[in-house]
Image: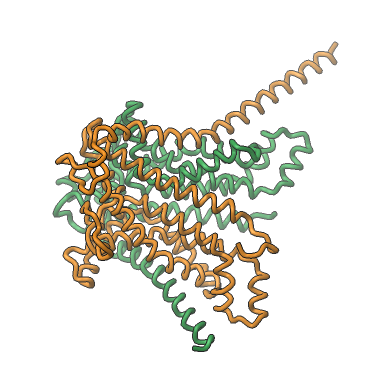
Chain colours: A orange, B green
Amino acid sequence: MSKAIELYGQQAKERRQRAGEWIVENLVRISGISAIVFVVLVFFFLIREGLPAFWQVQPGNLFGTKWYPTFGFFGILPLICGSLLVTVGAIVIALPLGIATAIYMRELAPGWLREILKPLVEILAGIPSVVLGFLGMVAVAPLLRTWLDMPTGLSAFAGALMLAYMALPTIISVADDAIDAVPKSYRDAALALGANHWQTIWRVVLPAARSGVLIGVMLGIGRAIGETMAVMMVTGNAARMPDGLLAIFQPARTMTATIAAEMGEVANGSTHYHVLFAVGIVLFVITFLINALASVLMVRSGPRRGGQLLG
Amino acid sequence: MSRYWTEKIAFVLMTLAAALVVIPIILVAGYIVYRGAGAINGEFLFGMPFDGMKQGGIFPATVGTVVLTLGTAIAALPLGIGAAIYLAEYARDNLLTHMIRMAIINLAGIPSVVYGLFGLGLFVLAMHFGTSILAGSLTLGLLTLPVVISTAEEAILTVPQSFRVVSISLGGTRWQTIRYQVLPHALPGIITGVILGLERAAGETAPILFTVAAFYLPRLPHSLFDQTMALPYHLYVVSTQVPGMPASMQFGTALVLLAFVLSLNIVATIIRSRVRRQRHW
């Protein structure tokens, strides 16, 4: 009798335990799935609030070259061009600097210096963009004004400079990992064939690390194109079409800055409000594509094995 | 040119590049401390702003940022750690897992100002939270979620497989194994990741622009549904929106914000290095 009760108690305990396991497993699964839900929700809300812009504004106007919302001109091309101009400028500055710094930190710097450099780059990653923007306004723009003889110094170039430093930590750390992942046997082979240190870096290590470096560049671009505050504070915020390469030294205005500067002042549900969400859709799609590309590259480059040849 | 000289020149260029990256960082930090230190006093840190923010202190902005950072943690932690446990311990190599990983990568890539738009659309307007600490915390929490998930997952994966094998061979269930073996050992790593995520959230301006930030509100917030000032937005306001603002107010605000954010960074670094030293496996 008592044995039966014991057995019954044990079974009940096991049942409870199994129910507990089931509940926990499903709770954490739901947390995981929530990531998908949030991406869908973000996209849904952008569409819901942004889509009306596409029938409230004539396509010729919406994809035109004039952005004067108070007069009913909602051309988003100058904003897209502004974002591209600043982002391309930032990458042109940050890419060589970032790769060279990664090479210096991993190949040339003595151990003690590397221990100082790494946290410094981490600090750069941690500086809030509004602080960088503030410094850009009060320190960098005045310097540019005197050095380059510009009217204010607030220009796409100042924005690109700020963005370059914000993208640098990403580029450096990914390039650093990529260089680290190059099998030691490659290096040994090059050195054994009589190449010196630099020839080994330039002809063997860098080509072998190129897919990793490319991922760093993609992520850097994604970061730069979505940056808001620093850009808004230093680019001078003039929504104009760039005319040639020298436009980089003139004021520009990005998509992000436009949303941040104007959303606070529009009436909910107005045309202007919907157009700003439409600009958000464009931003979302661009960063989505860049990140999808980077993640595909990441999966393809995968964990590299020693025997695998370049590629 | 001999390859010897090519190497010399290349190395000099690399060194110069590294200097170009690092020296501005030191200059930036140094300049803010140099110009901002003079503004720091009791009234600035613990006083209310007055005279259109040109005088007084930044106490409500500091409190607002601390409150928002806590709110972000509360919003992001349960979901983030749950998702990390799922990915590290339960997920199989199937379509669902791939989709979750893609979603996390994309969440991490969404521009912060787009999070602001989303927070405005969902929390402020559709859910009727209004411009409030609640809406701002949820928006920032969502922005922090991908960081928390990926760092927590990494921390969980560093716990050696043998720990799990031993626990299960002793009759432990899956959850018991996770609860009593995996999580305690992964905890410091998870905390580090969470703090780094909060560091980013604390300095963000764009997501709080339309969801919580008040231009000028010289009092402390009363409830979750109250607006609040916040340090990053306050710095933006005093440096661009108010003409004739004394420079000491601007640099002082920048210094306090930078100190808050970097102290989070330092705490995370200390925990991380201490754990690395103590780890025996």
Q: Nearer the viewer, residue B240 or A217?
A: A217
From this view, report whether residue B5 is shown above or below residue B232. Answer: below
Q: Quadrant of the C terminus of chain B?
A: bottom right
Q: In the drawing, does residue A91 fall left or right of residue A1?
A: left
Q: Nearer the viewer, residue A216 or B18?
A: A216
Quarter of the view holding residue B251: bottom left
Q: In the drawing, does residue B1 fall left or right of residue A128?
A: right
Quarter of the view holding residue A259: top left
Q: In the drawing, does residue B6 fall left or right of residue A205?
A: left
Q: Residue at x 38, y 46 (%)?
A: B111
Residue B42 can be seen in this image: no
Q: Nearer the viewer, residue A104 or B181?
A: A104
Q: Residue at x 38, y 65 (%)?
A: A92
Q: Nearer the viewer, residue B31 or B212?
A: B212
Q: Position of residue B216 (x, y in %)?
A: 21, 41
Q: Which residue is outermost to the front?
A: A60
Q: In the drawing, does residue B107 fall left or right of residue B277?
A: left
Quarter of the view holding residue A279: top left
Q: Residue at x 56, y 61 (%)?
A: A177
From this view, report whether residue B28 is shown above or below residue B250. Answer: below
From this view, report whether residue A36 is shown above or below residue B158. Answer: above
